[in-house]
Amino acid sequence: MIGSPDVVAFTKEDEYGQANLDPWALPEEFSVPLHPLADSNPWAKTSYAKFTKDFILISEFSEQVGPQPLLTIPEDPKVCGTFDLNYFSLRIMSVDYQASFVGHPPGSGYPRLSFVEDSRVVLGDSKEGAFAYVHHLTLYDLEARGFVRPFCMAYVAADEKKIMLQFQELSFRFSQASECLKAGNRRAFAKELQRKLRDLEYTHSVLQREEGLQREAGPQCMYSAHAVEKANELANVEKSIYEHRDLLRQISSYHRRPRRDPQAVACQKCMSECLNECEELLEKYAKLAKPFSYTEKGEERQGQFEREGGEEEADEEDEEGVKRRPSYTPQLIKGKSAKCFDKRLKTLQELCDETFYEATVELLKETERSFRGDLCYLHTRRLEKALRRKQRVTNFLFEGELGDDDEDDVGTLRPFCAVNHTVNNYIHLNPPPIVLGPEPFELDALEPQDPLDPASEASHTQDSELGLGESHLESSPSDQTLETQESSEETKGSFSSDKSGTGPAEKRHSLASAKSEAPDPDSDLTPDPDHNTDLERESSSEDMETTAGEDDGEDGGGQTPVSLLEVPSDLEASKDDACEGSNESDLLVPLDTACCIAQDGFLYEASAPEAVPGLHQSPHLSQTLVVNQEPQALLPLQDDYTVGSPCAESPAAGLELPGNLLGDAVSRISDGSDCTMSASTGSDRAASPLGYGGVVTLRQRKKAGQGALRFVRQYPFAMQALWCLLSGRTLVVLGADEGRVRRLVSSLALFVPGPGKCAERVQAWLSCPFTLTDLHRWKLIGLQRVASPVGSSMLHSLSRYSRYISILDADLKTLRCPPYQGQLLANIADHRTYVRRGSTYFLHAQSTLCHLAAKAFLLTFTHHLHMPVSSTEGPEVVEGRRRCFLQEQLGLGEEDSQILLYLSRLITQQYLQPATGGAAAPPSFSFNYTTSVLYRI
Amino acid sequence: MLKWFLGGREAQSSVEKSSVLCIGEEQPKNCFTELQVLKGHFDIVRFLVQIDDFRCASAGDDGLVLVWNVETGERLQELRGHSQQITAITTFTCHDEATSHTSLITASSDRSLSLWDPDTGNRVQTISDLQSVKCLLVLERLCMWISGGEELCVWNKDLELQCQKQNHSDTGITAMIELPKNCIAAAMDKDIAIYKLTISTDSPPSVAEIRHLSDHQDQIRALINVNDDLFASGSHAGELVLWDATELKILAYEHILWEESQASAQMEIRVGGAPKPSEMSVQHLTTNGKLILAAVGSGLYVYSVQTKTVVAYRKVAHDSNVLHTMLMSDSELMSCSEDGSVRMWEIQDLPLPAEPTSPGFFGMWNFSRSNKQSGPPSKKVVDLPSMRTLELTGDLIGHSGAVQMFLKFSEDALVTCSADHLLILWKNGERQSHLRSLALFQKLEEKGGL
């Protein structure tokens, strides 16, 4: 809380309650909010962050120098830009909930290790434009004060809502990382203890010997000062041994204590290994604790000790193998330890086992990758994924990448294990939802509804009683749409139990939300006209054994919130203004002063297209330029690293700027933004851990959309070409120029049904004669036209197999294929289409294809279209029924029916594939005998 | 067509002139709308034999015998053992026990004979160091089989040599058929030798030549049984001779001759005067008892046994030599050729002379086949009303080499083998799709949902 009023933490109670769940509600993945941002400009939520993209920051509260950043993920200095990591570390670490602990708790003789659960807080810093999910954790360090080293991992983003809405998953991911670090740390700590114990024992034995010698030398009854000192030292060492043994015992009891953190799932095998190690150590050192008496002969004891030591070492080597240096010479421990500030603190790598550290960093990197993109993007991606998971049967047809469905199951809480123990006992949890745009509801719904809604009243009072400064996104139960309910899953603990979306669980769930979503006491405390204020901060810190977090939360709640959302809403207004009056080009957009101050800059709204290229150079520069884009969009988009996605498509799509000049600018942007957009979305997909090695990425597919659009606009017979592809007739693109053929092929590849994971059904460039097998292996072939003997044999194969193929001549611009007069493809192959952007066209085509796939699914799995209903029916009746279905119910002509029949065939084959064993039987290739005609441009 | 691809702007009109006979792409009577390419051979595949309703075996120059499931296209067995090309293959079913079991007998250029079990893929027995074997004949009735080549050997079902007979011809036996009364006809060069197999209970069987028919002018290429009383042989010079199986006399002698000058000429029966031997060589004969289908050069001739005349023909049915033919019914036939295609034909009655003058019909007809007809048979019908035409109803294009043989299974499945090392399994697409739907709903039911 260092001087920053909006660095606050809130906590949420874990309460479960009941709420009425609409039984008719659509499942989550189908309930796309129709107008999620109905009355707010989606691009209004700008931020003024000084960093270009979200990143993960790991900081520690060093006992020597205070809070300091350790590393960022990605470790690219560009990412943070001018963002002051030190300052931000200070802020996030200052919410140190762990102050409670340490030292000798009253009533216990030994120092105690505190087993602190992690805390999860969301912090905001409006001035910096940064919001962070902050995950505090403590690691043990024998040399540290109180044996603990506080660390935190923060996911820093410019978009607060992104963090809020992703809280659950962030929390899940960071918990994994944290558990991993802690597991490594416990090992390291145990090792350190062991070393220390050995040193202590050695010291002890040396001291004892010295004392014995002294005792022998000096008179029995007299104690020299030296002797007294020695005796004290000995006593100290003994005490220290006891203490360390106790520490060892404590650390080994770590796993026994009940975890209150539901997300803290650790690999059981790691745990038990660590435990065993610790217990062995404990056992070993238990016997040594008995103070030695020097009555026996020194040499003998010494020998014994050495033997023991040797055994120990041997044991250690067995246990730890190469991890430790092979021999260890015990060292004398000085009576007084070095000063706190003199010693070097261990680094994070040293604190955790190296493997664990690296695994954690990997995990965090993956986390960072998976959270790239803005909220909309994440949301739609998740929706898409959820939908796709339901359509496994038809997915292969047109959905590019399928491989991601299993790897990336958010629905499984799988303990992350650094050493890759295969863990069978993972837990299912509800997929953390992303919710899009609950705020429109809040805007109007908050206070007016309060008195009307008894439930909210009740919970209101409850909350008030609790006195917790609780804040959340969903303010009123009257907003109990599905989305808001789902978002309330942020309530901690709500997914600790094993429920896979079953009714009761859901109910309980939504009840929890109903309760916790009660109107905000904050709004009472600070009667701010803008209720959005509540939004800006939320912390559902995991409840902790130390209640510091909650205290913090309370404190934070008590503080006067500074409205952040005022800014966007004003901005939004101004945007609207700007849109309306954007002809006045050099218009200075009136912004909320707070915002201006925060950013130290101004937003301009203007028309000069020259500004666009300049944008990429630096944000500072852009501020002086006259631009018509969101500030965030000005950030270096071309850097394909950048995923600031709201920007990429915002200006062109969102703001229809009138005027020729502007139109130009827009179209320029749109041209460019094709690549930027795909860069922003596609690249991270490609780089994502979901991993499509040589797979066609979304980016490529979107690019292909551009190409396909061009094709459609350029060739009047595009429809026929698409029909060939969709009805399973191999299309050969013939041309002399490799580039052109490849381009055509890659754009047409969009329409190849079931292209395979790596587009196996497409051959972009072939320069030798093809065979029959090639024809059904590849559905789209780019063929080189050569004037040579090779060429003629190739042409021979073309003419020979002409009945199976359609030939698109890229040079002559002709298409030879069966005639097609259907209507089905008219809307994706419209020569005069108004669609101008490749990605728009891509989506358009994609939706049409999806539609087709759905129809094909229906056709495939409708029993009576393939089977006789009664035993008296012959195959002709069934055939007639099928035809009737296609023609009358789906309204398809002969040729259009062929598309569906082909798709249906693919679906059938795909469905049957595992059963028939696939590999043994060669694929079958079907065709029909129809004449071809030649289409010209 | 080539011209069009090469860039001629006039394109479409000249597209289909390259082929001698082209049906075009519209083939409503062709039911083979699905194919599977079966790979596995490394050299020319020459032989196909049917094992049972759903299995067939293929063999070729790579010495491999592969057993296929025709329903699924799966390769069931791979019979390895011969080091050189396979010269003959046949199935051998012995009914002497309650269960009849089919095995495969193969002969190879490595001078060995092998008996295989197609179920397990085991080589049950093998005999090496033989004279070369060119043909095999199974006498199921006697549960014996005969290998022919430079010598004629009679084997029992356990691959034990019963008796053998040297012959003195240079070429050896190229074809054998079984005749009534334990007789065997064997074609050797220009002659047909008739052997009599004597089987007595107390002594091993013996074989003796009883007749020597040397009426052919040229080498005999084909020898088939027509029915119990008749057999037929065809020679390299285009002679087709119908023999009485018991009397061993010529019943009919037909010399199929290709006349270059007279395109409109009817079937000529002549002696002597052969222009180009390969063009009129009888490559293959098939029969269904009533009709004999002769593949002569690249043409097809349908010969009626009853009327002892050619009832329909097409001189140029393929671009190249016809290698194998089949009569599917009284009116449908199929042929395959070195040109890599399989063609399906229908014996159609000629339209009555009055009718074909309808312009609509001719217009369409000409449109669909813009190319020249090699033998326009429609003009000369008046004086020979029994004459019918052979109309192309469909062709199967897939192989890139000569189609050596094909085998038809019931339910519209056809296997072709070719010099391009491939087998292609042609199927009725609609039926397959129906079968797939059946399987789909069955699986759906098993799984209890999607």
Image: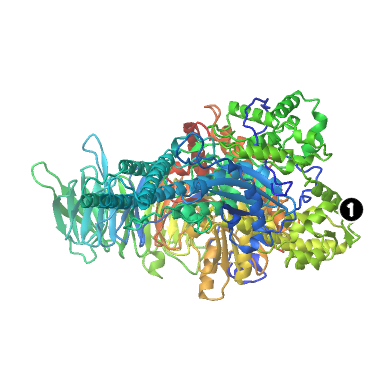
Q: Using the rendered view, name the quadrant where residue A12 is placed.
A: top right
> What x and y, as percent, mark residue A531?
80, 39
- Name the residue at 71% across, 61% down: A710
Q: Would you say residue B437 is visible in this rendering?
A: yes
- Name the residue at 33% across, 42% down: A289
Q: Is residue A690 above or below residue B433?
A: below
Q: Chain of mark 1?
A: A
Residue highlighted by disc 1: A580
On screen, residue B203 versus residue A799, left or right, reads: left
Q: Residues within 10 Å of mark 1 (few under 14, many from 20)?
A: some
Q: Is residue A143 above or below residue A618?
A: above
B258 and A540: which is toward the camera: A540
Q: Would you say residue A749 is visible in this rendering?
A: no
| Outermost residue, left side | B202
Q: Judging from the image, what secondary structure is the residue with disc 1 in? A: helix
On screen, residue B313 versus residue A655, left or right, reads: left
Q: Is residue A541 above or below residue A354?
A: above
> What x and y, as percent, mark residue B36?
46, 51
